[in-house]
Structures are given as C-alpha cells and as structure tokens.
Amino acid sequence: MMQDSRCLKRERFSPLTYCLLAAALLLTMILCVCVGSVSIPFSDTITAVWNAVWGLPIPERIAGNIILNVRLPRVLCVTLAGAALSICGAAMQGLLRNPLADGSTMGVSSGAALGAVIAMATGFTLPGFSYGGIMVTAMAFAFGSLVLILSLAYALDRSLSTSSIILIGVIFTMFISSIISLIVTFASDHTRSLNFWTLGSFSGVSYDQVRLLGLALLICGGILYRFHPELNAFAIGEDNARHIGVHVKRVKLIILITVSVLIGVCVSISGTVSFVGLVMPHIARMLVGPNHRRLLPASLFSGAIFLLLADLTARTILSPIELSIGVVTSLVGAVAFVMIFYKTRKAG
C-alpha cells in the first residue's frame, strides 16, 4: 500500500512531453493522409485541406476528392477512436487496479460487437437516426458485459484478482465470438461485410461519424478526466479511497457506464479493435507517470498515434489489398499482453 502511494507521487512530466506528443500526432496524421494506394505530395495535401477550410477552389491537379472525402474523414475517425479506446483502458486499469484491464481483455468490446452485429443483422434502427440502432445496442451490450464479467469474477474470487477477471474475460470473449459466428452464418446477405467489420475496419467512414465520435469523446473523456482524483485514490485501494471521502460505488458506476458508452460508440463505428486500451496507457505511464491527471491526456495522444500507424499499416502493407486493422493491433497487442502479464505476475 505504501509502495503504491510512493509510486503515485513520482513525477516524470514536463510540458515538453505534451508538446512532443502533439507534434508527433500531427505529423502522423499528415503522413496518413499523404500515404496510401495513391501517394499524394505533402504540398498538395496541405493545399487541399487549407482551401477546403476557407472555401477556396481546389486546383484540378490535386486529388481533392481522395484527400477530403476518403482519407481525411478516415484519419480523423481513427485518431478519435484510438484516443477514446486508450483513455478507456487507462481509466479501467486505474479503477480496478489491474494492469491488464481493457475493453478487449475483459470482454467489453466483444459484448459491444455482439450488440452491433445483432442490430446490423436484424436491421434495427431508431426513427430519424439510421445509425442509432447499432450504437445504442452496442453501448447496452458493452455495459451489460462489463457488469456480468465483474459479477462473475466477484462470485468466484471476492478479491477480484487480475487472474480471475482476465480468465473470465477471455472465456466470455470466446463465448461471444461463437455467438457472433453463428449470427454471421445465418445472416448470409451481410456475411462478407460482417466478417470484415468484426475484425475492425474504418473503411467508408464519413464526417457524420467523425462528429459523432468526437462528441462522444468530448463528453465521456471529460467525465473520466473529471474523476482523475478518484482514480488516483483507487490506486491505493478502495478502503483508503473510502476513508478519504470517495463515494466508491457511485464513482465506480459512473466510470463504468462512461467507459461502456465510449467503447460502444467506437465499436459501432469501427468494429472490434483490440489491445489499444491495454498497451498504450502503459506507454503513457512510462512517459508521464501514474498520476491520472497527466496519464489520461497522455493516453489520448499515444492511443491516437498508435491506431493511426496501425491503420496505415493495414491499408498499405499489402496494397491494394486492405487488412483489417484489428489484425495489426492484435499482433502487436498479443506480444505486449504477454510481456505485461509476465511483469505483473513476477512483481506479484
């Protein structure tokens, strides 16, 4: 307990860190807009974006349609999704004091994917909001999955140990995957799109989805950041947090609902993208320390950069064939998962 308290006091932060992260994110976004199956010069990219912002005509020599209607909304959506998944992972790890907590390892992403697949297969929509059915069901299933997994883990192990939560999360994910496969088998008209979507894809996203994801990140990210003192208190144990005035049950419920909503929105747009929330908070923690006041913003930057590079790799490494982005993130995340789990068990 005293060791956790001392760790929380260590600072490895300077304003320069955020400046470097912001610069790295901007450069990565520009790179992702310029590079693809059709390479576009940097000057043409800047000209197209600048002219579009100010309502100026775009020169005919510039591939403005590719830049503005295909790559730019995709890059913006990937940036926001990476930031959202990463901050959710950081919040869950802090709340549960579990370095392996993440939407993918705990089955939350799989639950959201099941809800979205059911909505897509049945054609469920909301009046006046055609995309709302997928989003609402994804959020509801994400929260239900999280509550179910934590309840089962608590019933089996009152200490909610890392091994119990991860084991149940993995079993739950396998169970959900089998149900999704069953639904995809019977939804023959949507089989190809559903198979590709369940592995993660940002292909064909629009500015409407960018605005939706941006609004969700602004609201939910703001709520999570609002509770950074409580997350710091949870780092030294629930009992200590309760003794210093934290309403443990209420804070837990708010954070879990917020995380479920944000993961549900991400999954409804991009499908299942694994391991972003697992790996990147650890990278951010190495850069700025464990204080959630600094960790949550750093996780936003690092998650966005990582997912942008993963998406760039997915659409260029086998060009003109596009890989699912979940394939790339899973390859990286699987190795990181083993390393983190080994370090955790060794420290324990």
Image: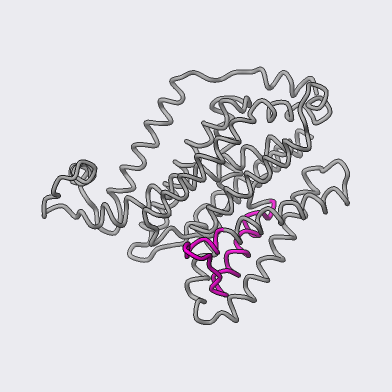
Instruction: Check the image and report above or below for 308 versus 328.
Output: above
Q: Residue at x 20, y 41 (%)?
A: 54
How many numbered marks, from 0 up? 0
6 sits to left or right of 47: right
Question: In the depicted view, which residue is nearer to us: 229 or 314?
Answer: 229
Q: Position of residue 342 (x, y in %)?
A: 71, 41
Q: Quadrant of residue 176?
A: bottom right
Q: Quadrant of residue 229?
A: top right
In the rendered view, does 129 fall on the left or right side of 250? left
Quarter containing the C terminus:
top right
Residue at horizontal 39%, vertical 47%?
Answer: 76
Who is closer to the viewer here, 281 or 133? 133
Q: Nearer the viewer, residue 260 or 173?
A: 260
In the rendered image, the quadrant that contains the N terminus is top right
- Residue 230, magenta (yes or no): no
What is the residue that sits farthest to the left in this orientation? 60
Looking at the image, residue 133 lies above or below residue 36? below
Segment tinted magenta in the rendering: 106-135
**Residue 278 rendering spot, x and y as whole percentages:** 61, 44
